[in-house]
Amino acid sequence: MKLLVYSAKDYEIPYLGKANKDQHKVSYTKEALDTHTAIQAMGFEAISIFSGDDASLVVLEKLWDLGVRFIALRAAGYNNIHIKAAKRFGFKVANAPEYSPHAIAEHAVALLLGINRKIVKAVNRVRNHNFLQDGLMGTNIHGKTVGIVGTGRIGSIMVKIMHGFGCKLLAFDLAPDTDLVELCDVTYTDLEVLCKKSDIISLHVPLTYDTYSLINQKMFAFMKPEVLLVNTARGAVVETKALIKALEKRTIGGYASDVYEKEKGSFFKDHSKRGLSDAQLRTLLSFPNVLMTPHQAFMTIEALTNIAEITFYNIDCWEKGTASENELGYETIGSS
């Protein structure tokens, strides 16, 4: 099968090449999929896209006319593809749902520790040969109440890690995990109560119609003024305007995130010379109690290996004419 990989990064190409095992004719482009770059898929039966690619209705229509029939996502989330439209056209679409939930949960912990203990500030200070400790005060994580929003594959691991830290655990999920209740003494509650009682809140829900701006002005109003909010889910789960207001009014203690509401045009690019054009993102990054990484939570050797293998497993299934268990069907619609 001829496959075009959009948004191909130099660091992931070796993993994709190894997983392919010379079975398919693969081409790579560093450009993201959008209305302008869709034409590059001419002559390809399949494409692979990442979270920053645009597979909206208009783009899908172009891809279908060009002869593309299969779309393999190199991510678990699929909010960037119009699933309903894809199914109407007849595309086969599959994601990589369980590539490495530990990678994401561990990065969430790294962000939490980083913002709580002022790690970046301390490292930058020491690099300048300044060993003063002023302004580096943090708190113990042990004994704090941690609210986990979403206890699926990633959230359940975050629960276990925080349980190991000796934290009191609250959780919000439409489908409570009884095993977590027994193993980690988790108390499931509604989102409002979780926001009111938590010292730390970590987000682990997919971006759907129901979770869009889930953390909004109303929820920020419930939070403790010292709460630390960690987001390794999707940027749009948090309403950025409301977040900025909360930071300005100092009604939350800090925000640590690997994602952003409007990543397209800003993330996955180097803006160090020209600067950011997104004024809202510039404002967000101006706060000293904001710690942000460039959507790198998935970047572990294990995760990249698994993503590549799952991607080509999906492609292999389609070439053989069999269904992959990772295919997104009507029952998974909700993030279009």
Image (cartoon, rainbow, N blue to C red):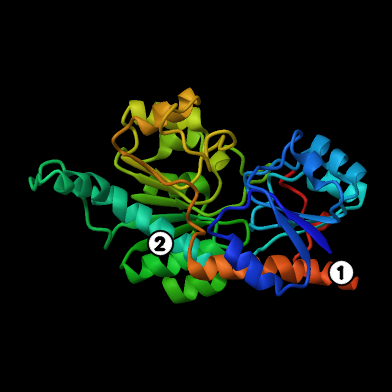
Mark 1 → mark 2, Cα distance in angstroms:
45 Å
Q: Residue furthest left?
A: 132
Question: Residue 144, percent across and down?
Answer: 30, 57
Q: Quadrant of the N terminus?
A: bottom right
Position of residue 217 in the picture relative to residue 53 (left or right):
left
Residue at horizontal 34 percent and vertical 33 percent from the top:
251
Q: Amino acid at mark 2?
A: Leu
Q: Residue at x 56, y 46 (%)?
A: 234
Q: Are marks 1 and 2 in contact (CB under 8 Å)?
A: no
Asked whether, in this view, residue 321 is left or right of residue 283, the answer is right
Q: Secondary structure at mark 1?
A: helix
Q: Nearer the viewer, residue 240 or 30?
A: 30
Residue 138 position within the rendered picture, expressed as x and y whole percent measured from the top left: 20, 50
Residue at horizontal 64%, vertical 65%? 16
Quadrant for residue 85, please give it: top right
Quadrant of residue 61 within the rendered picture: top right
Given this view, does label 1 or label 2 mark the residue nearer the observer? 1
User: Which amino acid lies under the numbered mark 1 shown in the image of this protein?
Assistant: Glu
Q: Disc 2 on helix, strand or loop?
A: strand
Residue 286: which quarter of the image?
top left
Q: How many marks?
A: 2
Task: Please give the label number shown on residue 319.
Answer: 1
User: Badge 2, how many Cα within 10 Å: few under 14, some, many 20+?
Assistant: many
Q: Residue at x 50, y 71 (%)?
A: 180
Q: Position of residue 292 (x, y in %)?
A: 40, 43
In the rendered view of the protein, which quadrant contains the C terminus?
top right
Q: Which comes sooner in the sequence, label 1 or label 2?
A: 2
Residue 336 visible at all: yes
Q: Nearer the viewer, residue 164 or 313?
A: 313
Q: Which residue is mark 2?
A: 169
Q: Is residue 205 left or right of residue 43?
A: left
- Whether residue 186 appears in this view of the structure is no
